[in-house]
Amino acid sequence: MTTSNQAKTKVNYVDTVGFGADVGGRGFHIPYDLSIRPDGRIYVVNRSPAHRVGIRVGICDVNHGWYHEFGSDGTGDGQFTGPTAITHGPDDRVYLADEELNRITVYDPEGEFISKWGEQGSEPGQISGPSGLKFTSNGDLLVVDHLNNRIQRMTPDGEYISHFGSEGSGDGEFNLPWGIDTDSKDNIYIADWRNDRIQRFSPDGAFIDAHGSSGNGDNEFNRPSDVAVDQDGYIYVADWGNQRVQVFDGSWNFVDSLRGAATVSPWAQDYLNANADEAEARARFNSFVEVDAGDPHEISSKVESYFWDPTAIEIDPEGRLIVTDTLRHRLQIYQRANE
Amino acid sequence: MTTTPARTNESLVAHLLRRASFGGTTQELDHFASIDYESAVDELLDARDTTAMPQDIVRRYHVNMSDLRTRPSSAGNWLYHMVNTDAPFVEKMNLFWHRVFATGQTKLIQGKAMTTQLDMFREFGLGKFDELLIQLSKNPAMIMWLDNQDNHKASINENFGREILELFAMGVGNYTEEDIKECSRAFTGWTVKNTDYMALKMRNNTMRPYGYINWQFMFDPEDHDDGEKTFLGETGNFNGEDVIAIICKQPATAAFVARHLYHYFVADELPVPQWPHFPPLNPEAMKVMTDAYFESGYSIKAMLRALFLSDSFKSEEAWNARVKSPIELVVGTLRLAGGYDSPTGDVYGHIAAAGYMGQDIYAPPSVEGWMGGADWISTGSMVQRINFASDIVGDVNRDGIVELIERVRADAEANGSATPESLVRASLKHLGNIKVSEDTANGLADFASKGDSANPSNEHIASLLQLIVATREYQFV
């Protein structure tokens, strides 16, 4: 679904991957972040707050392939209780942030525990509610230190290098920052969640510019949770509170807004095939009902195809946009195209 | 010439705040005592929330309070609101309507439908009763709760048609079985969108493939019986709105709503099923409210204003005459103690505690809601009530308790060194101007004297507070 095309660029819906699986197994439950390995495998963090057995990382691909899952609810090695972010390192290891345990856990690509680090606090090197992870091209790990309102630059082993940002709403200041990405020049983009804007910084953390203000119009945000930048510099923002994804070119010109267009995935179809009564009733189901609410969250609760809390976004090696549609337990995939 | 601002008796203010709020903090008691009683009533009734925790914060740190799938998440979300709001009367009314129009997540499965119903109560619960009944009849949670999606033109389902007359608006004895059938016919076609799939997902209790889908009202004209109906003595091609208009002009409706309000805000009445057989406890209060009902065009707020200003409500006989519901006890204690300034996992434990005491909100025991009154008290529930309140007020790490202790100490030392008696008096005052018997007061003073009452430690004052919330008197409202 596209709603405008100012720069003669469109972002088209491609496919839906996933299925609600609240007790583990093939599928997702409250997918909260994702990371894409260079081979295309997608590692999806499942927050699963109500059914703790659903907390895990699942591995899949855009072709509906399902590999396996790892991790579980707990405080032991390799476990987590409040997973918020995941990323792959240049060492092919997987790094997962836990905002409740205030630690980063490191796994091999198969999900075997390697190490963990992190200490709760506000001193340099300490973290409080880590919510975003991103490696720079030179191998430093950027950690969004959510409750400390700063970005910390660490080694992959957790050694402190530097930080930037502080609490506030001015340039270079943050109010509960969440998601992070870098562009091809190593510039850093931060979803400044409660300031309703995206901030852009140079590779060494110097403020470049900010975009957005509070609202629900084009170029306005309601609690943006994540940001992704593709190889051509297009910027995608998970506009969490507005239940949409907004797309901009590298100069912040508005390109498109996505409300969600999910379809039945093969995994979901397998479920319906095995449950004839639901399949039969669903044959008369319209997922795009007209809604009598104004609040985007309320609307999304009633329209199955729309995003409902689009929390994290990433660009895969083919340039596809992958969105964790958190409360619908699936990934929605889109691709930018020039007309 | 100087004028002295009208003040209100502090004990009367405390009574008003126990009933129209969840009790009062010292600041609230002082504020409402500083203005005249009528202004205090109006301020409580007109308040709009400005201090509830923003939903983006709740959803960010309680991810399960975004889709609200489970009852701890939906009930927890409401608890946050009740504890933090500066418009507590609205939440007391929401609890009232949740009790009268009892709807259960246990059947509906998804909490989002429940919170959507709660939002409807917030918007319409103090307005005109006919508009509230229309909204209730269109509310998807109520439709699915009472199976109105199965109420068809060709074969009526009387569940909703019966309950709107029996439990929601009029009470047994004021209509006939034929009226129930005609009422049900008027509500045929009042259903939810994607009816078949939504009903099946609820029945199968499945979040697959893509989570729950919050329901939305739909009127299906093809399934609506537009034929002539005779209802409560009137004849016409009535639809649901017409039926509600007829219901709301009945004296029995005004009396039924008034009795519910009296039962909830003034004194424990008999259980609702006995109402047809026994007259109301206080006919005078009934008349005050029913007059307001008709004079205002069915306004609930007007009924309550009249009630709160009535001698029946202000009478000392009404003070501390009701047993606190578990939610009143939990919310009232938490509002005294603070601690909900930022998201906390404690919210789940506190919701569970209310359940152990006998009140699982969003899970009433039946369509008749909770009976209340003495039913709240049993050996087991008393232990839970005392343990909960005692744990909260004894936690000297809570900011709110530290402030409470400081206020008690300052008040007890206002006229020199504190004494056991001044400590007890100050503690009772700052816990909401609680009145206790002489025996209880003596027992509390005896306890207070066992420590260094002239220089009481935080722990000693906290222990005294714990003893007070364990008294019989703290269980009343």
Image (cartoon, coloured by chain):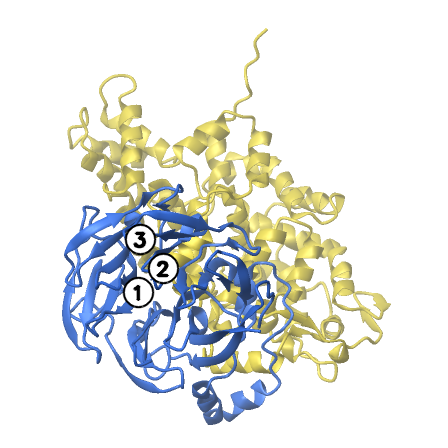
Instruction: Give the secondary structure at mark 1.
Output: strand
On the picture, is B235 further left or further right than B128? right
For mark 2, name the chain. Answer: A
Say which amino acid is labelled 2.
Gly
For the point 47% across and 73% down, the residue is B109
**Between discs 2 and 1, the one toward the N terminus:** 1
How far across and how far down the image is residue A145, in percent? 28, 53
A17, above or below A296, in the image = below
> Percent position (x, y) of residue B452?
15, 28
Which residue type carries mark 1?
Ala
* Vertical placement of residue B65 versus A196, above or below: below
Quadrant of res B63: bottom left
Q: Write down the chain letter for disc 1.
A: A
Name the residue located 68 percent from the left edge and 54 percent from the top edge. B129
Q: As shown in the figure, which amino acid type bears the numbered disc 3?
A: His
Q: Residue at x 25, y 70 (%)?
A: A73
Q: Give the Cα distance between marks 2 and 1.
A: 8 Å
Quadrant of the rendering where the C terminus of chain A is positioned = bottom right
Label ID, residue A146: 3
- Cα distance, mark 3 to mark 1? 12 Å
Q: Secondary structure at mark 3?
A: helix
The residue labelled by disc 1 is A85
The picture quadrant where one finds residue A238 is bottom left
